Amino acid sequence: MNQPKIDLPTRLLTQLFPWRNAATWRIAFSGGLDSTVLLHLLASLSKNHSLPTLSAIHVHHGLQAVADTWPDHCRLVCEALGVPLQVIHVQVQPGASLERAAREARYGAFQAAIQNNEVLLTAQHLDDQAETLLFRLLRGAGVRGLSAMPRQRPLGLGYLLRPLLDVSHGELQAYATQQGLSWIEDPSNDDHRYARNDLRQRVFPVLTERWPQAAVTLARSAAHMGEAQGLLDDLAKIDLAAATTPSVFDWLGLRSLELAPLQALSPDRQRNALSHWLAPLTPLPDSDHWSGWDSLRDARGDAHPIWRLARGELHRTGGRIWWLSDHWLRSAPGAVQWPDPAVPLCLPGNGGVTLDGKPPAGPLCVRYRQGGEVMELPGRGHRDLKRLLNENGVPAFVRGRLPLLYRGEQLLAVANLTGLDTDTGGNWQLIWTP
């Protein structure tokens, strides 16, 4: 005998039970059917259950004229349910994929809005999960991509939850009709230039006509892929632990790995470990672009190869690989005068320096390496700075950003390098905070 189906509010409450101690449940509210049902369910449950504070977020992309009326609709719905609403306007960056750009803008807004111990609830459902799996399968995604949408993941200072992934679109539609809800119909959902719309309106009806449980079974496959990805992540953590060794340059505050333990792995395990390490930092490269890793790994020992990725670069130097992004990819600025060495000096785009101890007589300034610099060392005479940096194993990408303390044309010190960062008597020390 079949078990009776548990009602939708109870199923939702069960999914969210582990998160009852969150400070706030914030609902991503587009005004469409799915998010309207989620908002209504939570507002109704809050009347009879002790839930975290509810609030809603509507992100306005401004991509179509009709969308200008949606914030007002969302305000009316939220006012009727007694749920505060925050409307966030975003600028969608132009690009090859408008869908992707809008999604990045939307989730960027969510991430900035979510505070510590807050949870963002989104209304993706079982059919969305099945579409995501099929869409990524057609794009040749690997296990990570075929895991589709995770039920939960970190987001900013809080978490993102998808509590309706086991609920079908038909169930949400039935609930909305039963409760007499009104919602926004997005005209772009009928635009077949978007691949997802084609899947939803042309492909899935054919699939479900032949296989009525297609959405359920595809979502189940995504869950299996999620389990497999979890095992791959566990393996990656084991492999990365061997490569996460201390470096004398940990004070740079950069992520790095020792290369030799990675080289000892099979190529497949190398890619798995690096994918896990890079995932929080940059969109992962597709299969064709992994040749960049092979070139970096196999370059000769005295080379300094670079693998350029979407949001940064991987550099190999000194037997390690280093992740560089943001200001590390820009050239250091010019010389900065230091009128009062008793006060820390801000270096534009390069952190700052301090002189610990009794500073030398001035006038002082901080410069950066141009080539040909010479430094006088006690007992060693004049030494070429390039040779001194080689002796200290300074990574190639650091050399042009390493602050050099000058008095006139005399090179007095090199920040943070033992024996080069102080004077003969040890009266002061030049300290750089990148």
Image: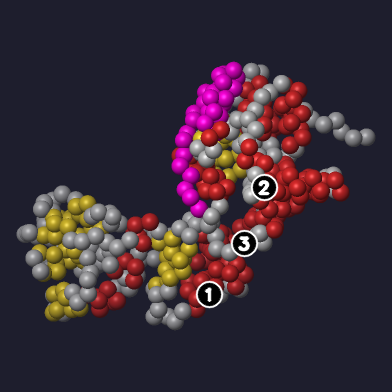
Residue at the (64%, 18%) spot, across then down: 47
Left/right of residue 58 with respect to residue 17 in the rendered view: left
The one nearer the camera, 319 or 187, is 187
- Which residue type carries mark 2? His
Left/right of residue 264 with respect to residue 408 in the rendered view: right
Residue at the (14%, 69%) spot, across then down: 411
Residue furthest to the right: 1
Task: Determine the image quadrant of residue 286.
Answer: bottom right
- Which residue type carries mark 3? Leu
Left/right of residue 97 with respect to residue 131 in the rendered view: left
Instruction: Say which quadrant the N terminus sits in.
Output: top right
The disc placed on residue 235 is 3
The residue where tag 2 is placed is 192
Packing grade of label 1 (10 A; few <14, some 14-19, many >=20) is: some
Residue at the (54%, 73%) spot, across then down: 291
Measured from the top left, where is residue 215 in percent x and y? 77, 45
Residues under labels 2 and 3: Cα distance?
Answer: 41 Å
Residues under labels 1 and 2: Cα distance?
Answer: 39 Å
- Which residue type carries mark 1? Asp
First in sequence: mark 1 vs mark 2: 2
Taking 102 as reference, is 20 above or below it? Answer: above
Residue at the (47%, 34%) spot, across then down: 88
Instruction: Say which quadrant the C terminus sits in.
Output: bottom left
Taking 170 as reference, is 136 above or below it? Answer: below
First in sequence: mark 2 vs mark 3: 2
Asked whether the viewer can see residue 170, the reply is: yes
The residue where tag 1 is placed is 294
Q: Which residues are magenta?
A: 67-95
First in sequence: mark 3 vs mark 1: 3
Asked whether the viewer can see residue 143, the reply is: no
Residues under labels 3 and 1: Cα distance?
Answer: 21 Å
Measured from the top left, where is residue 213 in percent x and y? 83, 45
